[in-house]
Amino acid sequence: MNQFKEGLEANLSKIGQNIQTPIGHALRMETDFSVKTPLGILKGKAGDYIVKHKSGMVSIIESYAFNKRYEILR
């Protein structure tokens, strides 16, 4: 489990647009993707966000929903 968290954190900081949110970190993906979690495999589409919550849980938020909920600050 720790290796998964470390690997995801490393990938979040290396590729795409890494955004720190009040809930954790978010990464906008440029291609379709899959993320293996302890609860199963999550699938997302290009433009969706992988969100790593402060609790360590990972989820996927579709781009339109993410853009309605959050404002990207640079």
Image (cartoon, helix red, strand yellow):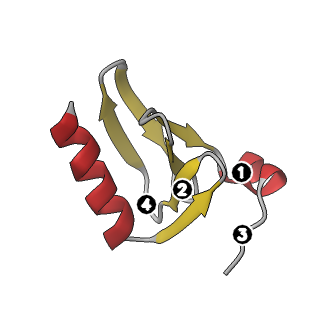
Which percent across, then down, holds residue 16?
Answer: 44, 71
Q: Which residue extends farthest top? A: 39
Give the Cα distance between marks 1 and 2. Answer: 10 Å
Q: Which mark is residue 53?
A: none
**The residue under label 1 is which amino acid type?**
Phe
57 or 35: nearer the eye?
57
Between label 1 and label 2, give the one nearer the viewer: 2
Left or right of residue 2, residue 46 in this image: right
Q: What residue is drawn where x is 21% and y is 30%?
A: 1
Q: Residues within 10 Å of mark 4 (few under 14, many from 20)?
A: few
- Contact check, label 2 and label 4, Cβ < 8 Å: no
Between label 1 and label 3, give the one nearer the viewer: 3
Residue identifier under label 1: 66
- Contact check, label 1 and label 4, Cβ < 8 Å: no
Q: What residue is drawn where x is 43% and y is 60%?
A: 31
**The residue under label 3 is which amino acid type?**
Ile
Q: Residues within 10 Å of mark 2 (few under 14, many from 20)?
A: many
Position above or below: 8 against 55? below
Residue identifier under label 4: 31
Residue identifier under label 2: 26
Earlier sequence position, callout 1 versus callout 2: 2
Q: Residues within 10 Å of mark 3 (few under 14, many from 20)?
A: few
- Contact check, label 1 and label 2, Cβ < 8 Å: yes
Give the Cα distance between marks 4 and 3. Answer: 20 Å
Q: Which residue extends farthest left? A: 3
Earlier sequence position, callout 1 versus callout 4: 4
Q: Please, what secondary structure does the residue beneath circle 3 have?
A: loop
Residue identifier under label 3: 72
71 or 34: nearer the eye?
71
